[in-house]
Image (cartoon, grey):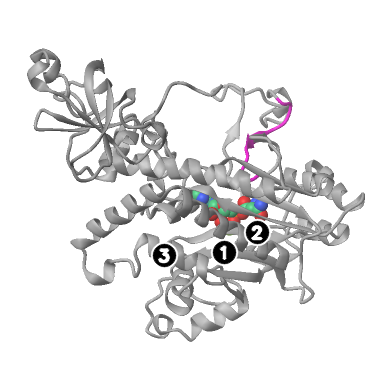
Amino acid sequence: MGLTKKTIADVLQTAATGEEVTVSGWVRAFRNQRFIALNDGSTAQSLQIVIEPEKMDEALLKRIGFHACVQATGTLAESPGAGQAVEVHASEIVILGDNPLSEYPLQPKRMTMEFLRENAAFRLRTQTLSSVFRLRHGLGHAIHKYFHENRFYYLHTPIITGSDAEGAGEMFRVTTLDIENPPRTEDGHIDWKKDFFGHPTNLTVSGQLQAETGALSLGRVYTFGPTFRAENSNTPRHLAEFWMIEPEAAFFDLKDDMDLAEDFLKYLIRYALEYYADDLAFLDKRIQQEERNMKKEDRRPMGLLETLEFVIANPFERITYTEAIRLLQNSKPYKKGRFQFPVEWGRDLQAEHERWLVEKKFDRPVIVTDYPKDIKAFYMRLNDDGKTVAAMDVLFPGIGEVIGGSQREERYDTLLQRMEEMNIPKEEMQWYLDLRKFGGAPHAGFGLGFERMVQFVTGMSNIRDVIAFPRYPGHAEF
Ligand code: 4AD
Ligand code: MG
């Protein structure tokens, strides 16, 4: 049967001229007391509603203002004006929600992203944020579609967990104990046995370890869920609560993992270009306008659409960490002392180094592999050199790391030794070790930061503007 109620997107796509339609939405603009640009969020396009003010009650007319919520009924007709193919000749206007502008925080003019963040309850009504959030949805859909088409099964891994998957200790504790007055053991420590789960728990930093159980039974699985990191990073690329996509596949080695990452990322970009052309065109134009007042060196080397097309068209560069260090040490900024952080084998690459590799050296996405074992997580497969692990990070222009992944250590003894070296508590992780003991297999996977990907596709410069209610140090409003 299908839904009979139509959105503006439905009307624009399927309604015939001459048809009577009813649409509801928020007023983007009201020109000459005659033309309402009505937007209901279903598409970047607003529907033009033409009214005859002479025939309308003056009090009603006054209530049609910026972001007031209006229902319009009328006949769909070809539009003589520029900018739209059709318009609605209204026979009836109903105000569903008045919008007293004197008290409303948003205004019909350019507002900064910072200002909009403080008014997150309304910010999705703006053209920019609504485009971003339609794309966020579209990418989420494409992610499920891609994995479904490639026989990866969606596994829901827990939000509350007892393990620290990354071993980095950046966790938010989950407890029902009275923190003012916790129960104590005889020797004065907090008695976690009395806590809700009978042991310490935290919010997950990654669903990977649990996803590995899925890979070693269903073959290919993925998680897509909220992830929490209590790292004190106040950057345009970090959130304390973000969404991560983590595929995990049996019988995959590092090369298979890289091939999956590249194919997957290109698929997502292609999908966005195909199905969200209107939103992307708007965001592209928005960036061009924003850059008009910037110095040349601050502008992006390519437009948004151009960047997306470029990433699809070219193979990602693949280099080892050791090679990356060598290139960086021979680079101009290194020789002129322009890098803030040292470049030295054994140290992690910093954002400035990643950006040089991607934006200056190769001018395309770069996959860096085989990092030193000491700067990566315990579960990554030890290479034969005994010094590096089968890790891979995918670096994107303007963003830096979008994906972190690896082939997993499938050898019981080697894993046990790595856990001991890195002080990972074995007792709670026996189930993880057992995956190696009983019918183990080579396997690999990665994590894609969803917001970083949405940032890349929409061209938004701050990660806080691609998640509806951003959480970062000092901020958990709404
Ligand atoms: O590199 P990370 O820490 O890898 C893992 O968590 C692995 N367990 C993934 C796996 O192999 N299954 O995180 C993966 C990605 C990063 O590349 C980045 O895109 C994103 O998650 N990410 C963040 N995004 C926003 N805010 C943060 N604080 C992030 N930390 C990581
Ligand atoms: Mg990483």
Where, by quadrant of the figure, is residue 134 drawn?
Answer: top left
Read off the residue under disc 3.
Answer: 307
User: Magenta stretch mostly in which secondary structure?
Assistant: loop
Q: Are marks 2 and 1 in contact (CB under 8 Å)?
A: yes
Q: Is residue 188 left or right of residue 251?
A: left
- Residue type, numbered disc 1: Val
Task: Specify whether residue 314 is painted magenta.
Answer: no
Q: Which residues are magenta?
A: 197-206
- Front position among marks 1 and 3: 3
In depth, the one of 323 and 442 nearer the eye is 442
As drawn, is 135 to the left or to the right of 177? Answer: left
Mark 2 CB in 8 Å range of ligand 1? Answer: yes
Residue assigned mark 2:
405
Is there any visible trace of residue 464 in the rendered image?
Answer: yes
Q: Residue shown at 63%/35% (left/top)? A: 159
Determine the secondary structure under disc 1.
Answer: strand
Locate residue 285: give its quadrant.
bottom left
